[in-house]
Amino acid sequence: MLQDRSPEIAWTCDKRAMKDYAAEHAPWIQVPETLWHGTDLDQLDLASLPDHWIIKPNHRSKAVHFGDRGTTLDELRSVTKGWLRPYDRIAVGEWAYTQARRELIIEARIGSGVPLTDFKIFVFHGRAHILHTDLGRFTDDFQEVFYDRDWEPLNITNEVPQGVAAPRPENFQDMVRAAETLGAGYDFMRVDLYNLHGELWFGELTPYPSGGMEPFTPDAVDLQLGAWWAGFDTVKDYPVGLPRVISAEQSLDAESAADQDRSPVRTQRERALP
């Protein structure tokens, strides 16, 4: 986050650019249509919008407003006041936000106003390792549940209360495929998706989840994510001095398997984190 200034990552915090990327690279999933974008709300025709929609800044996160037929321009002017300023998270090193177009963007709301679950998939070097679901985001009942790539619940929290595990989606493998396709070519990318009645919708990409400033519990999770990010997938690949976050018995089993076929050890199956 502090050092990468490559062209490949420059566009990844521009919401319109990431939607174009998703439409091109994963055409089998749905991408929300951009209904309007601009900097002057006086140029917005509210009557042209559907019954349910959302407005957000194109160049920042954690800002969204849900609109409907009763929304007025005065309301939008009040809600979006300050949204076109440079994103303040740039100051902590989230450089790609400086490359995003500073404008407002309006999309049709997926699900026509029905609350949806966010599926946030952590992809390291093109492989999805873990994911978490956001339940009740933007409400007082916000909860998260973490899973491995086989949809086994993980005892992990990330500054949000832990919710109740849900049944595995029938199209979960399609979700993994979409995430790995969109995250390919990067050492890390979080790919966010929605799953509406078995139809996958693109949410967003982010190379900077929470700016890296929301710690995981237990602490060992941060070490494991860092190992995946650095490209160490198998137990034998761990550099000297990096604390291991799996049991000694599992380490021996994994090393034995690696000796036999040199296949990557699926460390998320080793989920007995201390």
Image (cartoon, rainbow, N blue to C red):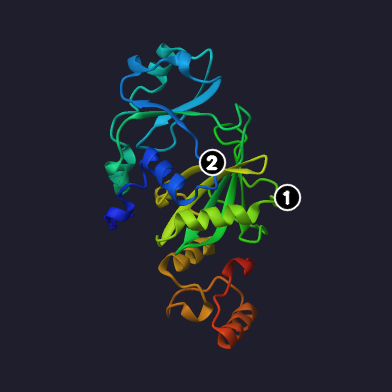
Q: Earlier in the sequence, mark 1 or mark 2?
A: 2
Q: Residue at x 55, y 70 (%)?
A: 245
Horizontal side of 230 relative to 257 (left or right) equals left
Horizontal side of 108 relative to 117 (left or right) equals left
Q: Pinpoint residue 26: horizontal percent, then vertical percent.
A: 49, 50
Observer able to see residue 195: yes
**How many discs appear?**
2
Amino acid identity at mark 1: Pro
Residue identifier under label 1: 167
Observer able to see residue 217: no
Depth order, front residue of 156/19: 19
Q: Pinpoint residue 3: horizontal percent, then vertical percent.
A: 28, 58
Q: Residue furthest right?
A: 167
Q: Quadrant of the C terminus?
A: bottom right
Question: Splitting the image into 4 quarters, where does residue 80 fall?
Answer: top left
Q: Pinpoint residue 177: horizontal percent, then vertical percent.
A: 56, 57
Badge 2 marks a residue whose secondary structure is loop
Q: CA distance from mark 1 to mark 2?
A: 23 Å
Badge 1 marks a residue whose secondary structure is loop
Depth order, front residue of 126/166: 126
Q: Residue at x 30, y 36 (%)?
A: 101
Horizontal side of 183 relative to 101 (left or right) equals right
Amino acid identity at mark 2: Gln
Horizontal side of 178 relative to 80 (left or right) equals right
Q: Pinpoint residue 198: horizontal percent, then vertical percent.
A: 66, 44
Depth order, front residue of 255/101: 101
Q: Residue at x 60, y 26 (%)?
A: 113
Residue identifier under label 2: 30
Instruction: Give the class, few, some or many, for how many residues have Cα within 10 Å of label 2's Cα (few <14, many ≥20).
Output: some
Q: Nearer the viewer, mark 1 or mark 2?
A: 2
